[in-house]
Amino acid sequence: MHITRYTDYSLRVLMYLAVAGDKTVTIRDIADSYDISRNHLMKIVQELNARGYLKATRGKNGGLKLADKPENIRVGKLVREFEQGAPLVECFGGDNQCVITPACRLKHVFSEALASFFRTLDQYTLADLAPARPNHVGQALAALLPAVEAAAGDPV
């Protein structure tokens, strides 16, 4: 299974917001922490907002916050929503031109593997990926904290 960069960045945005807790953060905060294009993140944030994963407030005191508690945001659900247009293999798509499809058993194997993949993702929530105020933060999340803490005026 291949996760698109769009889905990857969507998860990163949500992880950042989970680490931020109740603090409002900006797209610029997230873009700077991950070294990702601000314009690209704007599209992702718009979709996350439209799908109800986050709340975006415009204006001087605006910013981003999670729309729900991290433990209520399922990783499998998000990945399904964001990856629904990308077939795993050609025979899963509408433009299948594989000549062995009628007799091929590989499609069943891939279908079973994909179902297993999503069953595994369904076991995890955003809280599992980015626990709020963890005592020990993995290297990947440690990069988030300085920007979040600096925005709040707290020492790192």
Image (cartoon, grey):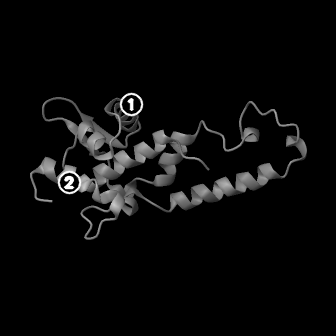
Between discs 2 and 1, the one toward the N terminus: 1
The residue sitting at 71% across, 43% down in the picture is: 89
Left or right of residue 112: residue 133: left
Q: Quadrant of the C terminus?
A: bottom left
- Crowdedness near tag 1: few (<14), some (14–19) or many (≥20) residues, C-alpha within 10 Å: few
Which corner quadrant of the image does residue 48 belong to? top left
Image coordinates for residue 63, horizontal then vertical, percent: 22, 38
Q: Amino acid at mark 1?
A: Lys
Image coordinates for residue 40, horizontal then vertical, percent: 38, 32
Q: Exactly how many numbered labels are in the figure?
A: 2
| SS assignment at label 1 | helix
Left or right of residue 152: residue 53: right
Observer-nearest of 155 and 10: 155
Image coordinates for residue 145, horizontal then vertical, percent: 23, 56
Gap in angstroms between the C-alphas marked 2 and 1: 24 Å
The residue sitting at 15% across, 47% down in the picture is: 151
- The residue that mark 2 highlights is 146
The residue sitting at 32% across, 42% down in the picture is: 35
Q: Amino acid at mark 2?
A: Pro
Which corner quadrant of the image does residue 59 belong to? top left
| SS assignment at label 2 | helix
Observer-nearest of 59 and 151: 151
Label drawn at residue 92: none
Image coordinates for residue 52, horizontal then vertical, percent: 37, 40
Task: Give the farthest residue toward the right.
Answer: 103
Observer-nearest of 28 and 53: 28
In this view, 99 is above or below 68 = above
Task: Give the farthest residue toward the bottom.
Answer: 135
- Crowdedness near tag 2: few (<14), some (14–19) or many (≥20) residues, C-alpha within 10 Å: some
Left or right of residue 50: residue 3: right
The residue sitting at 28% across, 59% down in the picture is: 142
- The residue that mark 1 highlights is 43
